[in-house]
Amino acid sequence: MIKKELFQAFPTPILITKYENDLSKEIKFVEKQKLQNNGDNGNYRSKNTYLFNNKQLSKIKKFCEDSVKIFSEEIFSLQENLKITQSWCNANPKGSIHHAHTHSNSIISGVFYLRLNNDNPPIIFNNEFNWGIAPKIKKYTIFNSGQLIIPVKAGELILFPSSLNHNVPINKSETIRLSLSFNTFSKLLGNEDRLTEMDITKLK
């Protein structure tokens, strides 16, 4: 019998929180937003990239802020006070995808799902670790999988490190997949004694 002790090196957290209130008014507001084509993928995003500045979304914004606070303080144990920066809506009609990407100039990113049905595609997180070889896998686990597929529901917020690569596969449903995305940052980062401090308020 071989004695063994398994470690999980640097696991990546992903948090889902649930918004319990009715979304009908917020959906109507978002549906009225002017959209622009988001590349060649067939999906669209709002021209307004600061949607959370609108009072019509104040309840969802507060919920997202509270969820970010849980994620940053209870999971990452960050001292920084993260604030939502840009926020926009995504509309994925039938036949569209959202290409694999990360979110630059952000610490934690979030996607809040306004409208989904059972046929809408999930969000997929991609493992960018490259073995450099292609062994034959007997059973996929958290240690050898290249993707994590997470089905989501309307009213759910999914939070993740902004550097985590993710995408949305093709929408085969007749229903437009409608969501709100946002990024976060802090006015003050790092530690003065360790010479890592970045205080945006002091920049001239």
Image (tube, rainbow, N blue to C red):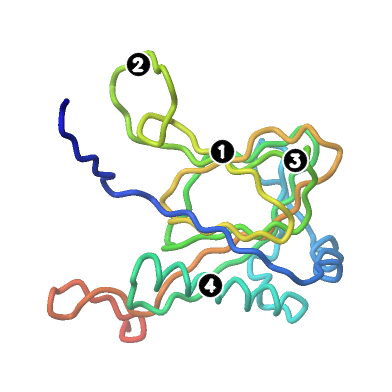
Q: Earlier in the sequence, mark 4 or mark 3?
A: 4
Task: Please report whichever mark, 3 or 2, sits nearer to the chain's N-terminal start.
Answer: 3
Residue 134, numbered circle = 2
| Label 1 Cα neighbours within 10 Å, binned few <14 / some 14-19 / many ≥20 | some
CA gap between label 4 and label 1 equals: 25 Å
Earlier sequence position, callout 2 versus callout 4: 4
C-alpha distance separating marks 3 and 1? 13 Å
Q: Secondary structure at mark 1?
A: strand
Seen in the picture, residue 130 relative to 56 is either above or below; the reply is above
Residue furthest to the top: 136
Labels 2, 4: front one: 2
Q: Which residue is mark 3?
A: 120
Q: Which residue is mark 1?
A: 149
User: What kind of element bears circle 4?
Assistant: strand
Element class at badge 2: loop
Compute the Cα span from label 1 to label 2.
21 Å
Q: CA distance from mark 2 to mark 4?
A: 40 Å
